[in-house]
Amino acid sequence: MTERADAARNRAAVLTAAEALFQREDLDHVSLARIAQAAGVGKATVMRRFGDLLGLVEALIAPRVTALRDRVRSGEPPLGPGGDAGARLHAYLDALFDFVLDNRTLIRALEHYGPYAYYANPASQFWIDELTDRIRVVRPAVDAPYLAYAVFTALRADVMDYLRQHQHMDIERIRAGVHALADPPGPQPDPHR
Amino acid sequence: MTERADAARNRAAVLTAAEALFQREDLDHVSLARIAQAAGVGKATVMRRFGDLLGLVEALIAPRVTALRDRVRSGEPPLGPGGDAGARLHAYLDALFDFVLDNRTLIRALEHYGPYAYYANPASQFWIDELTDRIRVVRPAVDAPYLAYAVFTALRADVMDYLRQHQHMDIERIRAGVHALADPPGPQPDPHR
DNA sequence: TATCTTACCGGACCGTAGGACCGGTTCGCG
DNA sequence: CGCGAACCGGTCCTACGGTCCGGTAAGATA
């Protein structure tokens, strides 16, 4: 059963309108009613297509997630398979960092609806698992799953926005901090310490 | 101008009732109306005393904050002034960790109202500044302010709850992870790496 | 092209939230 | 004791996410 033409048209209109609103407006001035109005559509139409607002935001992020995931799974090294372990970790951190930066409004919207929406997201679980693997190779002595969560938490969009806007840290400083978190410079731990 | 007796009585009743509700109920089942009802008071009374719900939560946390701050500022070393720098950092991390653990429901309530309520809190600013100082002494080569924020973020109540409840990490594992984040074991960085 | 089935549409509606308002009440000072 | 001010709490207001249902139009069929 294929989707009817008007339904497909409305889905696209809602996605476009929602995207624009999330970019332009402050997060808590974006409401279901305003999205529907901007899309020239009733509120129920939005709900029917996406279940709830969280579903709408996930649908907005989905294509970008897929794009990055493809680069990670089958792109050029070191982000894709192959290459030096250290370079792989750092390339991945950079890619995640840029992803969060580019999509921060949508990611914040995700965090806004539902508790744990950021972590529980299937996409995030993939990011975290991959991060865990890449950390484990470079730093076999640490608790890689925990460290992966900690780094991923440091990459929360709200945290990054806060550091930039209220603590006046610039982007490259934060980026360097994230790298240092996951893989501090220097030799491996000395068992005699 | 001193507070009238009935006003003081109501303030205490609201604090007690709110505390109990936050402990017992799920966070988003706690509403202004229920707090007022549990305190045997009108909603407006709650608002008058505390401005808004965020103010109420801050008032609930305040005495605990003060207690820990006193221990940090003038208690026994290594948490208080004096002692080995490394021990000071680790004692402080333990104290913060326990504080978050003990007060996680209130801290989550804080995070629930208002954006950045956790970081922007005056108390948190003190915690972060102190953390920055203690990190700086032990790890002069790193960006201490950023690392302090990253560690403090790892100590978010919602993050810890998520790791415990959904990732099944036990408390001591998380605690060890936080310590490793702030002060990874091993010798200092090697300039030739 | 005319008809009919059915997926689809959208504005009215619902329950609930935080917070403002205001007539009545009670505290406590002179 | 009496009075003014501080305080009280139920009602009201606005906005939210989400649901309902009578009406509409898409598009398959003949």
Image (cartoon, coloured by chain):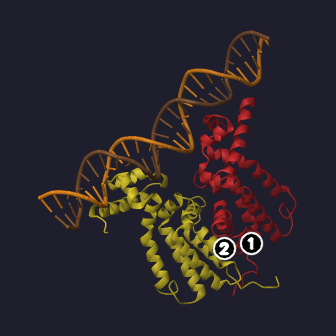
Chain colours: A red, B yellow, C brown, D orange
Left or right placement of residue A145 versus residue B34 in this view: right
Q: Is residue A181 above or below residue B89?
A: above
Coordinates of residue B47 in the picture (x, y in percent):
40, 56
- State the image quarter where residue A156 is shown: bottom right
- The numbered mark at residue A176 is 1
Q: As shown in the figure, which amino acid type bears the numbered disc 1?
A: Ala
Q: Residues within 10 Å of mark 1 (few under 14, many from 20)?
A: some
Q: Is residue A2 above or below residue D7?
A: above
Question: Could one spot residue A162 in this view of the protein?
Answer: yes
Q: Secondary structure at mark 2?
A: helix
Question: Could one spot residue A1 in this view of the protein?
Answer: no
Q: Tell me whether the residue at label 2 lies in contact with that at label 1, contact meaning CB atoms closer than 8 angstroms.
A: yes
Q: Nearer the viewer, residue B111 or C24?
A: C24
- The numbered mark at residue A162 is none
Q: Quadrant of the C terminus of chain A?
A: bottom right
Coordinates of residue D18 in the picture (x, y in percent):
56, 40
Q: In this figure, which residue is indicated by the disc labeled 2?
A: B146
Q: As shown in the figure, which amino acid type bears the numbered disc 2?
A: Tyr
Residue at image x 39%, y 54%?
A: B35
Q: CA distance from mark 2 to mark 1?
A: 9 Å
Left or right placement of residue A13 versus residue D10 in this view: right
